[in-house]
Amino acid sequence: MDISPLALPFPALAPIAGVRIGTASVPYKRWTRDCVTLVELAEGTVVAGLTTQSKCPSPEVELCRTKLPGGQARGLIVNAGNSNAFTGMAGRQAAEAQAARVAERLGCSADRVFSASTGVIGVPLPVDLALAGVDQAHARLGQADFLAACHSIGTTDTFPKAATSSAMIGGARVTLNGIVKGSGMIAPDMATMLGFIFTDAVVSPALWQQMLRAAVATTFNCITVDSDTSTSDTVLAFATGAAGHAMLASMDDPGADALAAALADLCRQLAILVVRDGEGAQKLIEVTVTGAVDDGSAHRVAMSIANSPLLKTAIAGGDANWGRVVMAVGKAGEPAERDLLSIRFGDTLVAQAGGVVPGYDEAPVAAHLDGQEVRLTVDLGLGPGRARVWTCDLTHGYISINADYRS
Amino acid sequence: MDISPLALPFPALAPIAGVRIGTASVPYKRWTRDCVTLVELAEGTVVAGLTTQSKCPSPEVELCRTKLPGGQARGLIVNAGNSNAFTGMAGRQAAEAQAARVAERLGCSADRVFSASTGVIGVPLPVDLALAGVDQAHARLGQADFLAACHSIGTTDTFPKAATSSAMIGGARVTLNGIVKGSGMIAPDMATMLGFIFTDAVVSPALWQQMLRAAVATTFNCITVDSDTSTSDTVLAFATGAAGHAMLASMDDPGADALAAALADLCRQLAILVVRDGEGAQKLIEVTVTGAVDDGSAHRVAMSIANSPLLKTAIAGGDANWGRVVMAVGKAGEPAERDLLSIRFGDTLVAQAGGVVPGYDEAPVAAHLDGQEVRLTVDLGLGPGRARVWTCDLTHGYISINADYRS
C-alpha cells in the first residue's frame, strides 16, 4: 500500500512518566510485523473513554464500557488484524481471558485492564495467540516507543499517526501524547476506530471524562471517510498523574482550562490525521457550515456534505461542482432556504441568493481544488449555528482497497 | 458510455389513448439528440405527483407542487441537460415562460402544464432555447413514441427505461405505461429523478394521488444508488380517462384494487430499472430486512445497508463480507440485538446468534455473488417489521463517471 499523499511526518514525542509500552508479533494474520500492543500504566492512572454507538459493538467495546465507570487503569492491550466483533461467546471469552492474563502479568485487577481490537469482523480472537501476545509484549515492556505502538495498532493505515500537545498546570508542564489508527469504516459516533491518549496530568476521573467528551464532540465526532461507523470505535485517555501538580477535579480549578484546551488540540490533530489516511484519500476536505439554526443542525448539514459521494468524487476530479453542495444541503433534512444559501470554495464566493454569483470566475476555485487541502464553506443565512467537519475525497483508491482486494 | 450490464430489453408498449408525444432538439448541451419532450394529454386528464423532499428544490418542482392540488393536466414538458435548479429568479422565470408557451400551444391554462428538468445544477434554463424546444416539439406531436421519449428525457442513462402493466376495470382493460430516467444522485425521498406514468384509466384526482403515494412508498422510495437525493426528483402520473369505465373515486370501488396493484407493479419495475442503470452498476442488490420492531425501522436498517460504501464495494469485489452487514446494521441507530441477528446471502444462512454459522461454507455464497443479482436478507429477530430496498454495487465506474469526467 502506497503511503497517503496527505501523510504528515511523525512528530517528536516526549516519553510520558508512568507509561511503558511493549509490542509483540503473533500470527492473527500473515503479517510479520508486531500486532499486539501492551501498555503498562502507573498505579493511580485515571482513565476516560468513549466507544462506538454501534448497536453491534465488539466484546472489547462492551468490556471497556463495563470498566470505564471505575475510572482507574493499570493496563491497555490492543490487538490488530482481528476485531473480534460479532464472534459470540467465543470472542467474549477470548477478550476476557486476554485481559485476565494482562492483569496477572501486571499484578492488578482485570477491571483495570482495557482492551481494544481492530481488523476483520466475525473471526473469534484466537485465545492462544492472544495470551502468547500478552506474554511476549510483557517481556518486552519498555522496549517500544509511541512510534512502535502506532505501527503495532495499525491495519490498512499507510502511515503512523500521532500528535502531542502540552499545558502548564500549577507550574508543571504536562505532556499529552496520542496515537490513532484508521483508515476505513470511519464515521465515528463517539470516537474513531482506535485512539489512545496518554498524559502525566493529575486529574480526577470525572473531570477527565468530561474533558474527553467535550474534546471528542468537535474532533473525532466531526470526521468521516466513508460514512460507515465501526463496531469497534474506541478512544481511551490515560492520565498517570506523574506530573505531580495539584489534582484537577473541576473546570474551575486553575489549569483545568489549559488541560482541556491541550486535550482538544490533541484530539483535533489526531482526528484530522485519520482523515489524511482515509482509504484512497488524495485530498483533505474541511467543511464549515455557518448560519444554521443551531450547532446541531449545522453539524448535520456539514456531515451531509462530507458524506456525499457525488461531492467527494467531484473534488477528487478537481471539479468545482457547487451544485452538488446545494444537493447535499437540500437532502440533509435540516432547515435551509435555497435563496439564502451561500457557498465558498477556498476564499472564493461561488454562489449566493439562490444562484451563482454574477461574473463567477472559476480560475481561483480551480487553483484551490488543485491543492491537497480543500476548504468548503456554506452559510445558511438562518441563525448562529456553526460546525466544522473533515473528510477526504472519494477516489479509485477507495474502490480498489475495498473491492478489488479480497481479504 | 457503455450500456449497463444490468440493462433489460425495452418492453413492448401499447399506445395510451389521450397521450401524444413530440420531442425536439435544442442545444442545452452539445448533444445532437432530442432533449425536449412535450406530452399533450387529452382534456379531462387527471394528474397525481410526488416531488423531492430536498430543501433546495428546482423551480420546476416548486411549480409542480403549486399545480398538483388542481388535479388536472393537459401538458407535460421535460428538459434534459439542464436541471434549472439553484438558478434564482432567472430560472424560475424561464420555467414559467416555458409552461406558458406550452399552454398557449395546447390552448389550455398554464396551471395544467407540468414541468420537469434534469441535468446540471446552477445554470438558468436558457429561455430562448426552452421556447424553441416547445415550438419544435409541438410541431412534431404524435411523431414520437415512448421509446423516443425515454431517450429524450435521459442524461447519463445508458439504456432507455420503461415498463407496462394493466388491469381489468369494469370490463375494460386499462393500460399503464411508465418511463423513467436515472442514474446518479439517486436516493429519492418521494420519487426518483424523473418518472412519468400514463394510463387511460378513469380515476378521481384524490384517489389517483392516494394510489401513487402508496405505490411510491414501497418502490421509488426504496431505491438508492449513491445516497444522494436530487433537487429535481419528480414522479407524475397521468390518467386520461380514455378507457371509459366508471370513474374510480374510492378504494372501495370495484376495480380500484386492480388499478392500485397495477400501478404499484409498474412503479416497482421502473424503480428497479433506475438501479439497474445506477452509475457504474455491475450488480443489482436486493436487501430485505425482517424481524424489525416495525416497518419504518426495517426500512431505515435496509437503507443503512444499501447505502454502505464498504458493503457495496465488497459486493462489487464478490466478497461475502458479512461483517460489513453487521456494521451497517449497527450504525443504523435502530433497535438491534447483535446476538439475535441473522444474515443470508442468496439462500445461504451465513451468520446467526452473534456469530458465523458452524461449518460455514462460502462456496454457495461466492457462486451467488458471481451473479448479476444479489439478494441479501437480514433478520433482526425483534418483531414483525419488514422492508425491501434495492441498490447497486459501488465500482470504479461510479468514480470514473463522477470524478474523471469533468462537466
Image: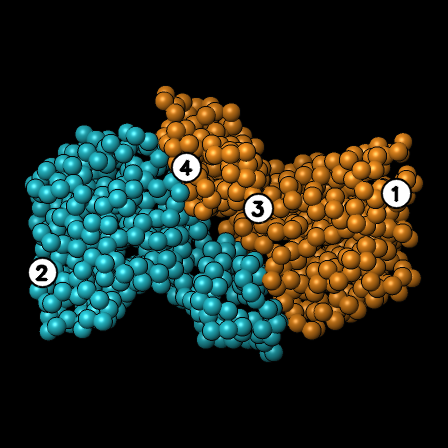
Chain colours: A orange, B cyan
Crowd band around label 4 with a 10 angstrom C-alpha radius: few (<14), some (14–19), many (20+): some
Whether residues under marks 3 and 1 lie with C-beta atoms below 8 angstroms apart, the answer is no
Mark 4 vs mark 3: which is more N-terminal? 3
Q: In this view, does A171 lie above or below B113?
A: above
Specify the quadrant that holds the C terminus of chain A. Answer: bottom right
Crowd band around label 2 with a 10 angstrom C-alpha radius: few (<14), some (14–19), many (20+): some
Give me the C-alpha separation between circle 1 and circle 4.
49 Å
Question: Looking at the image, which is closer to me, A308 or B396?
Answer: A308
Protein chain holding label 1: A
Crowd band around label 3 with a 10 angstrom C-alpha radius: few (<14), some (14–19), many (20+): many
- SS category of the residue bearing label 2: loop
Q: Residue A86, percent across and down?
A: 63, 67
Point out which mark residue B242 bears: 2
Q: In this view, does A239 lie to the left or right of B287?
A: right
- SS category of the residue bearing label 1: loop
Question: Looking at the image, which is closer to me, A26 or A271?
Answer: A271
Give me the C-alpha separation between circle 4 and circle 2.
42 Å
Q: Residue B184, percent across and down?
A: 37, 48
Q: Which of marks 3 and 1 is in front?
A: 1
Mark 3 vs mark 1: which is more N-terminal? 3
Protein chain holding label 2: B
Give me the C-alpha separation between circle 2 and circle 1.
85 Å
Q: Residue A384, percent across and down?
A: 54, 33
Q: Which amino acid does label 3 sit on?
A: Thr
Protein chain holding label 3: A
Is residue A151 among what the camera can see? no
**Number of marks in the rendered image:** 4
Point out which mark residue A337 bears: 4
Question: Looking at the image, which is closer to me, A255 or A2?
Answer: A255
Which residue is tagged 1?
A247
Q: Which amino acid does label 1 sit on?
A: Met
